[in-house]
Amino acid sequence: MTAIASINPATGQTVADVAEPTSAAEVARIAERADAAASAFEALGRSFRSTLLRTIADDLEAAREAIVALAHRETAIPEARLNGELTRTCYQARFFADVVDEGAYLEAAIDHAGDTPMGPGPDLRRMLVPLGPVAVFGASNFPLAFSVPGGDTVSALAAGNPVVVKAHGSHPALSLLCYDILAGAARKCGAPEGTLGIVFGTQAGADLVAHPAIRAVGFTGSLEGGKALMAIIAGREDPIPFYGELASLNPLIVTEGAAGARPGEITEGLVGSVTVSAGQLCTKPGLVLVPRGAHGDALMAQVRDLVGDVPAAALLNGRIQASYNELHAALAALPQVSTLARGPEAPEQGFFASPRILEVQAEDLTGAELQECFGPSAVVVRYSPESLEHALSLLPSSLTATIHAEDHETALVEELSARLGPLTGRLIFNQYPTGVLVSWAQHHGGPWPATNAQHTSVGATAIRRFLRPLVWQNAPQHVLPAELRNETTDIPRRIDGQLRLPSTVPA
Amino acid sequence: MTAIASINPATGQTVADVAEPTSAAEVARIAERADAAASAFEALGRSFRSTLLRTIADDLEAAREAIVALAHRETAIPEARLNGELTRTCYQARFFADVVDEGAYLEAAIDHAGDTPMGPGPDLRRMLVPLGPVAVFGASNFPLAFSVPGGDTVSALAAGNPVVVKAHGSHPALSLLCYDILAGAARKCGAPEGTLGIVFGTQAGADLVAHPAIRAVGFTGSLEGGKALMAIIAGREDPIPFYGELASLNPLIVTEGAAGARPGEITEGLVGSVTVSAGQLCTKPGLVLVPRGAHGDALMAQVRDLVGDVPAAALLNGRIQASYNELHAALAALPQVSTLARGPEAPEQGFFASPRILEVQAEDLTGAELQECFGPSAVVVRYSPESLEHALSLLPSSLTATIHAEDHETALVEELSARLGPLTGRLIFNQYPTGVLVSWAQHHGGPWPATNAQHTSVGATAIRRFLRPLVWQNAPQHVLPAELRNETTDIPRRIDGQLRLPSTVPA
């Protein structure tokens, strides 16, 4: 078996071998250890978990310098962004601690025994409980916020589940460093042995998903990778929930009004959104609809100028670079597609890529142009009022859809919203899709192929993925979890159909 | 193609041909009609939908006599139960109207724009929106409450989705009658043409699930049927959510204390729960754990007496009768299994079955005995303190698990709860699993193979299955749904992280 190597994308050179691929036997041992930890971890309760999450945040923060340096060396992502990503990663862990403390996520509900239109009803007490060990697949493009210490891990822990991470091959050394910090925090807090685990290698990831002890999977990656894991799950004796964030084109439409009124702001924002992080963000606007005519032409001229000044950037790994070049060659070879802009040539060494903007007329679209291309590129579709509908009819669903329009274009904005809403999980107005705030109201998901489930991987409700309802019927108080006992008043609960906020005075 | 026949299970005779199997072309036409209705139906809003649901309830109630008579003739379910089931079905429709009116199900949340630890954050407004046309598979055993006018249909409509029902072959005439009542109510209320549809035949069901316009599937039926639909969904270009309630053994354990203290109550409750509705309820306790020794023996003697008096009852159809007889013959042929009790012989005509109780010693269990058997039967496992763990270790997950114990058996009850909780969606104490109350706190689901998702098909939260989150970022007020506008105060919303109850005074 080939060792898992840590490679510098800026040079293409292997810096060190980090680990051996985890053997099937070792994956099984780790999964079973997680299973053995599950009930003890759950029993430690919500305040234990919020303390653990805050400790994880503190310990990641304390290792900031080492984390950012290693992440930069392994991913070529600029240090400024990595510093921001670490801030977000720590925030995320603390945020889920808040979510756990607040307790509404439990959806606690009590129906007292009594008469109903269907006869006497029993005492029913419902809340959400952890699923059991969760497998988390680290993503390449967010080596912190969507990887070992990322949102899937902290939301699964917040829900009360042990987590086994499958380290991404693009940053194995960073994965190990972060895992050691998380495991250290867990030990320090007194979490059961087995609350956290890590495996390396593609086969180990497959073995993990197939293991009976694993109860759910969180994944951010390619459509192909997601489909492969879904096939493994379909072959299990007991299929388990799979939460995949898979592919997203993120259309952005500029109206005639906006093109005329705000060309400078839009082109700057757009080129920034396409090229930030070398275009390796899942919310990158990969398809841009620009009106034909003078305003649109002026916009395109500015895009050409701006892109010409964006230096080539190192992609995360050689596979992404190869795909970028291949897909671009294929798109550029389509007769209906022309190259509108490209950045300065990429250096020969490492995994660099230069930005490219392609252009196609809306009426010429066949659908072949509408593919997600991971990297600093976008396809601009030039539309007329007549050809817009053809372009919209070909759009696949996406994580985001963005409308740039002017205030007075009321009817058009309503029409575009109604058209794009069903195709997305986040509908953005006069802003840009990249940069996903971690917050209570956030949603990062969308109809297939954006995600495969009606859930989010960012924001408070991401915790719902790793929970299931359990009802206690006619249960003695001592058997109930604290959250469902009579005297509890510190979390929102629905009592006999009435939603009640927490109170500091016992009822 | 063979016509869809209405058969009387009490005689085995075909009474009438009800419909032709729906052709592939007709299924496509119905699905596309539903798709075309989707956005107009959604746009009619919540108060329209609650009115529609209450109209459906009123119109079903108004046709009570005809519905119950036809249901009785087509299913052989006693009229008293059918009257109760219709009451529940009407209640369910009105209950989801209340759920829609109350509005917490929308999970509305607003994060205002402002500074965050990660920099300036945008205005984000999230709520749940309908998925689009839902395919609902009627179940045989609840020809009303889980069929055409049942919980899946009314929760999907409540969520704002058009519904296409696949009629169950066991009660096609009743399906058509109920469909006509629902479609009439929809017309009367002014719902768009295509809000409701119906198809007949197994192939039509498969075609429906494969059709691109269908966005989710609700199913209550067999594990095999569920797996077949899941395979169709896996083969779609865009896999869609499938909510299957599939198979459930529903273990019930009687402790030594309970067997000694309440033998009469327990045996009567147990035999009633096993044989009610000819044992064709998904929550029937199919596996009963009874202690060895004098108390358990006394319990078994009473079970034998009671079962001997339970007359044979007609099952829903010939296929269920054949499975019941086959599975029973196979179980009784296992060397470790003996027949403890059986009811009076079943008549030759129709699809009758007589109750049967089998018995096996816990230490002899191989797992082969632990199969769901649809019909009036159960397997009793006699356990000692030493052999109980072996029996528990073989239990599959179920919709319900029931513990009969005495108050003083505190530690034992906690131990059994901890053991059974992970295997079920509803943990019942000193009551019986059959009879599932429709209410806010109810949950009817469980780990595989009970259901395939972390959702319920009974109770308020069943609506969550047919919704997905959508976030509006930086949206002008006129584009937002009413529920997310600034001035809205009549539903619970989370504002900047704080859950707020509705208020009658505008904020």
Image (cartoon, coloured by chain):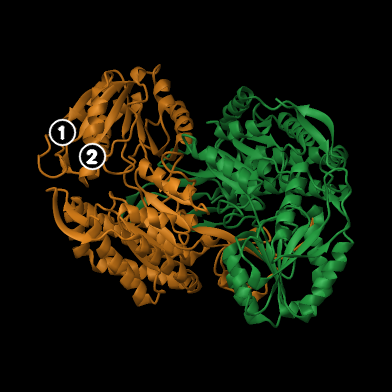
Chain colours: A green, B orange
For the residues labelled 1 and 2, say whether their Cβ atoms are less than 8 Å apart.
yes
Q: Quadrant of the N terminus of chain A?
A: top right
- Element type at mark 1: loop
Left/right of residue B421 with respect to residue B293 in the rendered view: right
Give the quadrant of residue B410.
top left
Question: Which residue is the site of mark 2?
Answer: B275
Rendering coords of residue A478 (x, y %): 49, 35
Task: Answer yes or no: is residue B376 visible.
Answer: no
Q: Nearer the viewer, residue A368 or A251?
A: A368
- Tag 1: Cα neighbours inside 10 Å, few (<14), some, or many (≥20)? many
* Residue at image point 69% right, 46% down: A151
Which numbered disc, 1 or 2, marks the residue that appears first in the sequence? Answer: 2
- For the residues beneath circles 1 and 2, the answer to whether they share a chain is yes
Pinpoint the chain carrying mark 1.
B
| SS at mark 2 in the image | helix
Q: CA distance from mark 1 to mark 2?
A: 10 Å
Q: Residue furthest left?
A: B348
Residue B468 seen anywhere in this rendered image of the structure: yes
Residue A488 coordinates in the image, percent (x, y): 55, 46
Horizontal and vertical percent position of residue A449: 59, 54
Q: Nearer the viewer, residue A3 or B214?
A: A3
Furthest residue to the bottom?
A408
Amino acid tagged 1: Gly
Please indicate whether residue A400 sits to the left or right of residue B281 in the image.
Answer: right
Q: Residue at x 28, y 49 (%)?
A: B141
Residue B343, numbered circle: 1
Identify the amino acid type marked 2: Thr
Nearer the observer, A91 or A217: A217
Q: Which mark is residue A141?
A: none
